[in-house]
Amino acid sequence: MGERWANWLITGAAVAVGSLALADPPAPAAALAADSHRVAADPPSDLAVTVYRNPNRQPRSLDSDDEPEPLDLDNLQGFALIRETRLIHIPAGESTVRFEGVAEGIEPASALIDGLPEGLIEKNRDARLLSPGSLMEATVGKDVMLWRSDPKSGHTEHLRGRILSDTDGVVFQSEAGIEALRCSSLSETFTFNSRAGLSATPTLSILIRTRQPLTKVVTLSYLARGFDWTATYTATLSADATKMDLGAWVTLANSNGTGFPAAHTQVVAGRLNRANGEIEPIDLGAPIVAKCWPEGNTSSPPELLTLGGVHPLGFEPSVYERSTLSSPMAAMALQEVVTTGRRVIQEQLGDLKLYRVPERTTVASRQSKQVRMLDRKSIPVQRIYVAWLNSNDDTELDETASVLLRTENKTGNNLGLPLPSGTVAVFATRSGDPLLLNESPMNDLAVGEDVEISAGRSADVTVSSEIEDVNLDPSSVKEMPLVPGIHLRQATFDDARRVVISNAHDSAIRFELRLQLDDYSRLVRADHPVAKRYGRPVFRLTIPAHAEATVRYQTARFDLQAVPVLE
Amino acid sequence: MRARTWMRVLAFLIGAPLSAQGADRSLSVTIYANDLALIQDTRDIQVPSGRQRIEFQDVSAKIRPETVSLTCSDIAIVEQNFDFDLLTPGKLMEKAVGREVTLVRVNPSNGAETREQAQVLATNSGVVLKIGDRIEVLRDDGLPVRVIFDKVPENLRARPTLSVTVSSQRAGTRPATLSYLTPGLGWRADYVALFDEKESKIDVQGWVTLTNSSGTSYENSQTLLVAGAPNTVDSNDGRDYNWRVRQERSNLQRAGTESGSRERLGDYYLYPLAERTTIANMQTKQVSFLDVHRVPAQHGYEFRNNWLATQDKPQSAQTVYSFSTSAHAGLGDQLPAGVLRFYIRDRRGDPQFIGESRIDHTPMGSTLSLATGDAFDVKVQSIVEKRTRIGTFDWQSDMKYELTNASPKPVTVNVLQLGLYGDSRITAESMKSSRRNAETAEWAVPVPANGKATLTATFETRF
């Protein structure tokens, strides 16, 4: 055991001879085999996958025009809890039990194995996977067979040799002497005696000691990156725009190269804390590059200070990033979207919401899948037109109003269920056919909260805001009344503003002007009654058909700079 | 048969080095919490007398050579080198300048080989050779030519290698210990807590997680984990390691004053692994160190509001679990820093993940309060209602906090108003607050099931 480490070589006398570490070290795996068994657990007999959303996805506000972000299979920031039920057969004594084929996004520190008998010594995850580069790296200093074939005759020579180095080119030694791989233009390659203990698929292993041979069913659970889910709502407006039908899909996606066939599948809504982003990534090894000595010749232009060309060794010199998610095989697979005909069932999970797919379903590799979440009919909605103003802006504003569909999340409105965040697409019906009006993000909404769904902008309702220049002719400007509760003490007044809303519709509209003031600013004067919405001032108006309305208001700042400092 | 010939050839090639593989070899690895490990390798070595070089292969590729020490009786160290000169085809040719190499030309039409001795003259952007009296450029004609070197030059290695030149006063076998510091080995703790909602109890498992990215495997080593981060001069300021980005909320509610039975070294706790283990390169290894069941734990809600924060819409309160690490009604252990993952059983009885939280080194007897995530149904909206200047340096801020609970259970939300520095005062409030510290006022606000609650407070501050 440990001979690989034991290459302490003493080269005699003061004149050091060029020494090579060629004491024949047996592979560590072989050394282990003497007193330890290596067994593989059976493939999973049962699987469960719980998908969690990207915890860093920011809640969106309605006044931003941000496009909702679709799930990108190449960059899924959520994660999943995978539970695999496996049968293991443990011989008596010390054994290494290998759980092969776990998701490559596994967070090894989160792995748990339930149902093990006493005697677990440790659990391990080797990040190194079998690849040409890692195989070469693991074989440095060990015996390989060199195959050299004559391109003309097809005759292949087999030579026993040893890899001396794989850094920036491969140096090997055989009976003939020391040579560099593929520098002669002959076709050369190695065959290896063993896979050097490298796993083909991501593998977790445990070291366990038992007195008797055992056959047990154990549950392996772990968190894995490269999953995400979102809720995708469709709101279809009735012809008179007073009711809407709301339907939703759970869209869940797996970017791992590992699939989970016939799995119990759940998704969890709500934001979870994640402690940090670091995990120990899968190591696919560096690509093998056969680099040689300088190869300039008399007919090539002089290349000053460049050392040698780079020859890919028999395959494209693809560089695999040390990424947990982009397994080369997965990258080649087609993205697939699957829609199932079942509906998820919601249950409470602590302070989160869990949605369970009622039947087993397959969460395949590189797949996004949709399961129906809800279908609610005839939800009464109010159609309101909204403009948001930062009152302290001295800019003039001229824009179209946003259209919001507003309702309350309660049973009386045919709702009254938690609405997890996602995107919502609004459709109008035009002679029986749906017509997309808008698509926007939606935040987590609990029962009882206000639901506001953006239905785009209306070209017919325009809002223009401008500073009312009081210097022009003070007598022409009507003094506005003070807002109740405001005392004009030590405040600096901003310029008065005038907001004109014009309605080109042939019906009256409800309009809300929502002010977004900073904490130091308050509304001091206004010519319309002021309401509060979530603590912010809002003017609510009804504007008749083909009419204009004008709102005038004035804000003041109550901050430090506004006040002359007393001596 | 063939293998035996092969070994003879090898022995000839390398000048038969004396390999000293002691039977009593012991490797011990001490891993600190700040990406630092002390490696000690002891074994019997057979040393002839006189000056000689001892090579240590497969020491950590990230070894800090200046920390190496070799202790062995009757041996004086002359010098030690850590050679980074790696063996590559280019280097091999470069070091062969002025030396003889063997060329094997292969006839492309019939595969016949012709051998020639050549002297390497130069390797500047192309290899120039002298063969007999003529000078030629290697593979100028593009035909296959193998170049065979008879030996690997000194100092060229497949991996960085430590070599120590020693002067031995006597020949003989004796134990030697090589010790050095290396980054690339680290450990932390990982905890799994399963919360039982009905009983308000948690089961906690603790695992130490070792990671090795030092480029080397440590086989069959005795492993000791130190819950502490020694200052190192190498890091420009060792304290940086300890100073994590200041968290928004401190998990530690009350620091403990109990001491357990764990081994200590100075002020560091030690976690020796029970058995020798092999820490392979690029491996993540976990060993259990804590398994306690049915510890009382409280589930609560917390909302932390920064000074003068108004939200556009209600924000979820944080779900908080708190428990003690005391020997009495607690985990009964000090906890090394790491990540605690919470699980809760779903309706089918399967544990589901509900969030995680980082903890620092926590003494025994502490009270921890860990936030796991947002509560879907419990939301708070804070509003700055009014902010008025009432004196030259005095401000009055009226705050309103609206709490909603969409769950069918009444809840109590701890509302924390942060940022009350200096002589800030609360002049009016709708319910009694407690000052957790000068900076923070706290209210425990009950919210009925499927209901609402409102909290108001007026602050007088100097800002």
Image (cartoon, coloured by chain):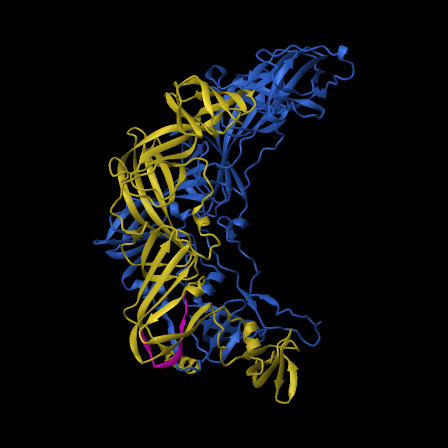
Chain colours: A blue, B yellow
Apparent side of residue B415 relative to residue B326 in the rendered image (left or right): right
State whether the magenta stretch is mostly helix, strand or loop. strand
List x then y, in percent, for residue A177. 49, 79
**Quadrant containing the N terminus of chain B in the rendered view:** bottom left
Instruction: Look at the picture and state if A485 lies above or below A301.
Output: above
Residue extending farthest to the left is A211
Residue at 27% across, 35% down: B295
List x then y, in percent, for residue B124. 64, 75
Residue extending farthest to the right is A472
Q: Can see residue A384?
A: no
Residue extending farthest to the front is A567
Residue at 45% across, 21% down: B426
List x then y, in percent, for residue A276. 45, 43
Residue at 55% across, 67% down: A290
| Residue A522 position by quadrant | top right
Q: Can see residue B188?
A: yes
Apparent side of residue B373 relative to residue B169 in the rendered image (left or right): right
| Residue B140 position by quadrant | bottom right
Q: Is residue A254 magenta?
A: no
Q: Identify which residue, B128 or A199, lies in the foreground.
A: B128
Q: Identify which residue, A284 or A316, lies in the foreground.
A: A284
Instruction: Look at the picture and state if A122 lies above or below A312.
Output: above
Apparent side of residue A236 relative to residue A48 in the rendered image (left or right): right
Q: Identify which residue, A359 or A451, lies in the foreground.
A: A451
List x then y, in percent, for residue B52. 40, 79
Q: Which residues are magenta?
A: B45-59
Instruction: Look at the picture and state if B154 lies above or below A456.
Output: below
Q: Is residue B54 magenta?
A: yes
